[in-house]
Amino acid sequence: MTDPRLRVLFYIKNLNGGGAERGMVDLLNSIDRTEFLPRLLLNRQDGPYLRQVEPADLVPARTGFEGGNGWLSPSGRVRRSITARIGSARAAKRLPAEVRTVRGRRLLHGIIESDNYVRFAAAVRAFRPHVVVSSLLETASTLVYLHRHVLASRNADYSWVAVEQNNTAARSEMWYDREDSRFWHAMASLVYGAADRVVAVSDGVRQHLEDDFRLGANRIEVIPNQVDVEGVQRAARAVVDRPYILAAGRLHPQKDFHSLLRAFALIAGEVSEDLVIVGDGPERGSLEATARELGIADRVRMPGFSDAIWSLMKSASCFAMSSKYEGLPLTMLEALAAGAPVVSFDCDYGPREVITHRVDGVLVSPGDVDGLARAIREVLLDREFAGSLSRNGQARARDFDRTTVTREYERLICQQLMARPLASREFNLAYSRVG
């Protein structure tokens, strides 16, 4: 007998410890299994969050459709189809100039001819999802766009929800050279313009999508990142030998931990706390060098990724965030839920939507190292103020509880199915059950 539940395919590149990856795992694990049959597709089955996913929820690394009969041979049908379609679109001026460049077409060819595209197309053919929920522009959402709107696969009769977790324009400028940045900015307009619905994790991201990519407000849904408030608050406190300021995130220029190190250096002689930065990434070496240059290397610890991040948050004297840009920082929500007093740069986007200044956290002008140092010092030395921030922060975190946020996704998924005229009787019967 066919399973009557709505089939939802969650799609992201891997589970390597970022906020988008954590959010996808939380959504997968909290969705109502009586109404929905979820599966998670990864380009690579690796990353620390993989331990939090049940093996039965994963699309197998090999789905059984790769190769063999050549139905998606990278050297055959796919290459001819993408070349013909891009050529036709170029002639009709349907693609922006940034995508029609030689490099742009080469990037598109490479994406479609990759194992990742083959794996996604095979997973759709095998699982036949009613809805695909993709996250991260370059590594998942673009592949869904190409599958549905460039190659126009006959299996592409699913509804598609694309989730934007970040400041796309700032990210492309930081991660790519000028030409590739223009390419991905143009692709973002195409991808998000083609999705049935786009989820923005904050009002700032929503406004960014409207202004930079000309998306209509009626096509964007604001659903924030979620936090397991009860899980965070049940976590045991970390056993520590010295008090500490905590920061967490990928060791990447986006997080601007160099500014945090400089701020800490300004107050290290006045406070007893060390600085602990949890996470890993390409900037580890340069951050260690900066700590040595500032004379604080013996007061700074970078232990890498930690499964015990909630325990570390509960024991922290202060949680500091120094990012240059965000979407809606999940680590901030978790720190609030854990009761850690939060000090953050007021970057675009997210912090000011979560924190009321000096009520449930402290906001500092972006890049203001002196201001960041002063705010951290105040929290560390004024324990009454820190206690007030802690209590109010825990109350604020409940507005982002996983149950509430997951119900918003479930509602959106059902709305999208009801709005899409699916011909299959099975599909109609399935979504009418929860409509």
Image (spheres, rainbow, N blue to C red):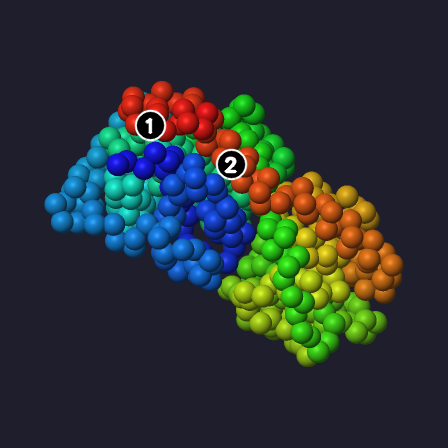
Locate residue 189, reporting x and y percent: 46, 32
Q: Is residue 13 left or right of residue 115?
A: right
Residue flagged by tag 1: what amino acid is it?
Phe
Residue sitting nearer the eye, 157 or 278: 157
Q: Nearer the viewer, residue 344 or 21?
A: 21
Q: What percent of the width, then of the height, locates residue 177? A: 47, 49
The residue under label 1 is: 427
The number of numbered discs placed on residues in the rendered structure image is 2
Q: Nearer the viewer, residue 91 or 380?
A: 380
Q: Amino acid at mark 2?
A: Tyr
Near-viewer residue (258 or 344): 344
Residue 385 in view (yes/no): yes
Q: Quadrant of the N terminus?
A: top left
Expressed as whole percent of the image width and height from the top left, the position of residue 262 reads 71, 65
Q: CA distance from mark 2 to mark 1?
A: 19 Å
- Secondary structure under tag 2 reads helix
Q: Nearer the viewer, mark 2 or mark 1?
A: 1
Say which residue appears at 51% left-offset and 49% top-offset.
Answer: 26
Q: Residue at x 46, y 25 (%)?
A: 435
44 to 212, vertically: above or below:
below
Query: Residue 144 appears in which quarter of the rendering?
Result: top left
Q: Is residue 421 left or right of residue 435?
A: left
Quadrant in the picture for residue 82: top left
Q: Secondary structure at mark 1?
A: helix
In the displayed structure, 270 sits above or below 37; it is below
* Neighbourhood count class around disc 2 (C-alpha, 10 Å): few under 14, some 14–19, many 20 upward: some
Residue at point 58%, 66% (across, down):
308
- Quick one: label 2 or label 1, which is nearer the N terminus? 2
Residue 139 seen in this snapshot: no
Q: Residue at label 2?
A: 409
For the point 63% across and 57% down, the residue is: 232
